[in-house]
Image (cartoon, grey):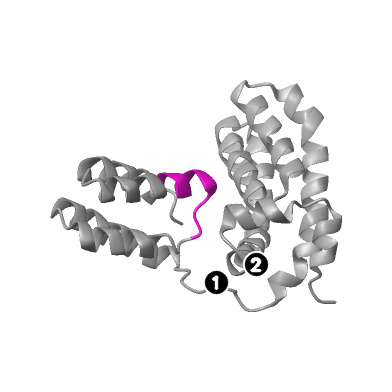
Amino acid sequence: MGFSMEKVLALGIDLRAGLEYTGGNDKYASALQRYYMTSDKNKAKIKESLSLGDLESFVITVHSLKSNSKMIGALSLSSKFEALEIAGKNKDVSGIQQNIRAALDEYETLLEVLKPLGEVAEYKAPGEISGEEAKKVADSLLEALDDYDDEKAGELAKKLAGYPFRITQKGKLKDATEKINDFMYEEAADLIREIITAIE
């Protein structure tokens, strides 16, 4: 059975929020597929961090899931992962135990509806770039900023926007682009260095 957007929306996904956060239909479709494709890794990380009592690793994973869920408009699920993130930061193990099942159940329900996306070829929106390419573009962008080449830096920043960053990093890239336009090269470079760490 193929993918059904109606089934996604029936789960209470906020399509308008998802389109706004991702930047349009093509990017939203790509984000949904990536969300599904990273799920096995995320579930394994949660299981491992809880079994080892590694709350730091747990917080990193649920923070990522909070952001990615919000990005696709799964706002209820994002809130559940946020509650787990807060509990993890506070070392509130009983709070995690109380809330983890509801979060993972809702996550599994969404993943089941997204499952057909995992059975098709990788979808990329026009202008979307891979992590490997994004790292090269970011390095070139830092060099352009070091050379005070605002024209080249602006072009590279635009190209870097093709990488599917999470909401926070998207905001930082937008800020960096504004700094480039204002000839604030060092500040722009600092922001680019921050978002490079989010490129996978």
Q: Does 168 lie within the magenta span?
A: yes
Q: Amino acid at mark 1?
A: Ala
Name the outermost residue toward the front.
Answer: 182
How crowded pointer 2 is (Cα within 10 Å; few <14, some 14-19, many 20+) is rated as: many
- For image coordinates 74% across by 37% down, the residue present is 80
Residue position marked by numbered label 2 in the rendering: 29
Mark 2 near mark 1, Cβ–Cβ under 8 Å? yes
Residue 20, given in percent of the width and then of the height, sits at 61, 54
Q: Amino acid at mark 2?
A: Ala
Residue 23, given in percent of the width and then of the height, sits at 56, 59
In this rendering, the answer to whether 84 lies above or below 31 is above
Quadrant of the frame with the N terminus: bottom right
Q: Earlier in the sequence, mark 2 or mark 1?
A: 2
Q: Is residue 93 left or right of residue 200?
A: right
Distance, label 2 to label 1, CA atoms, is 8 Å
Residue 54, given in percent of the width and then of the height, sits at 59, 33
* Majority secondary structure of magenta residues: helix
Q: Secondary structure at mark 1?
A: loop
Q: Does 135 lie within the magenta span?
A: no
In this rendering, the answer to whether 161 lies above or below 3 is above
Residue position marked by numbered label 1 in the rendering: 125
- For image coordinates 72% across by 44% down, the residue present is 75
**Residue 47 visible in image:** yes
Q: Which residues are magenta?
A: 164-172
Q: Quadrant of residue 132?
A: bottom left
